Image (spheres, grey):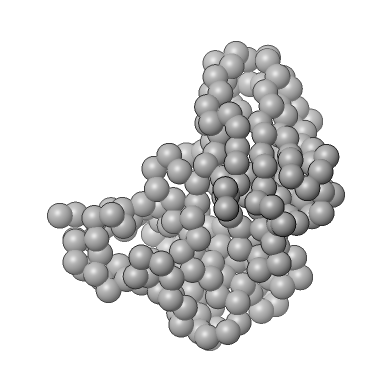
Amino acid sequence: DAGVIQSPRHEVTEMGQEVTLRCKPISGHNSLFWYRQTMMRGLELLIYFNNNVPIDDSGMPEDRFSAKMPNASFSTLKIQPSEPRDSAVYFCASSGLTYEQYFGPGTRLTVT
Amino acid sequence: AQSVTQLGSHVSVSEGALVLLRCNYSSSVPPYLFWYVQYPNQGLQLLLKYTSAATLVKGINGFEAEFKKSETSFHLTKPSAHMSDAAEYFCAVSDYNNNDMRFGAGTRLTVKP
């Protein structure tokens, strides 16, 4: 089992650029979650999908953030335009019928 | 809505000593409760979970947690700390209606030699 796969693992970009983070959930899992982790705010849920449908996006900070899940094996989180305050580690997690979430290794985003 | 509160953002113990990390939950329906561990520069890893079966749950790496409904608690314990236990620990809650999991703020465990 490959686990949750995220890419890239590290991203450094300049303010104003578009950033796209990618996630492949565990095969057979029907829920996918995007989190952001910072020292100041801890672990924050941004959005989650059930069966590829967004269920709760109330954690998405603002319109600069968008997430899609075009199929059961792929999701993206996009930030456009990026700002320095978006610098954080972004985690993707997936879960199946037993509810526990399995996390990917994260993408460390630095916006300069 | 459900939530968890972790008491103590930092806990320090000596190697071989008891580890006790505290978590209290709030939920209007029977909860599912979880403990996760995060090592530096890694994602969160599931330690153990409670889903309304036995109230004492055993997890990986010698950790266990006890669900106490009367105290709305789900504290994590390990009889003897090891240096490799140094990490951040997160308590989380969800309910059987959905898998929208809510995490606590985390407790950083330091193990002194």
Residue drawn at 63 percent across, 15 percent down: A15
Is residue A76 at least partly visible in the picture? yes
In the picture provided, is A36 more to the left or to the right than B22? right
A70 vs A62, left or right, is right
Residue A12 horizontal/vertical position (percent):
54, 19
Q: Residue at x 84, y 49 (%)?
A: A53
Image x and y of residue A106, in percent: 54, 39
Residue B88 vertical position relative to residue B5 in the rendered view, above or below:
above
Q: Quadrant of residue A85?
A: top right
**Where B66 sits versus B81, above or below?**
below
Direction left: furthest residue: B113
| Occupied quadrant, residue A78 | top right
Residue at image coords 44%, 56%: B37
Number of numbered discs visible in the structure rendering: 0
Q: Quadrant of the C terminus of chain A?
A: top right
Q: Is residue B87 left or right of residue A28?
A: left
Q: Nearer the viewer, residue A110 or B6?
A: A110
Kindly give the residue lying farthest to the front in the view shown: A1
Inspect this view and state whether residue A45 appears: no
Q: Position of residue B74 (x, y in %)?
A: 48, 74
* Quadrant position of residue A91: top right
**Residue occupying image coordinates x 66% and y 31%:** A21
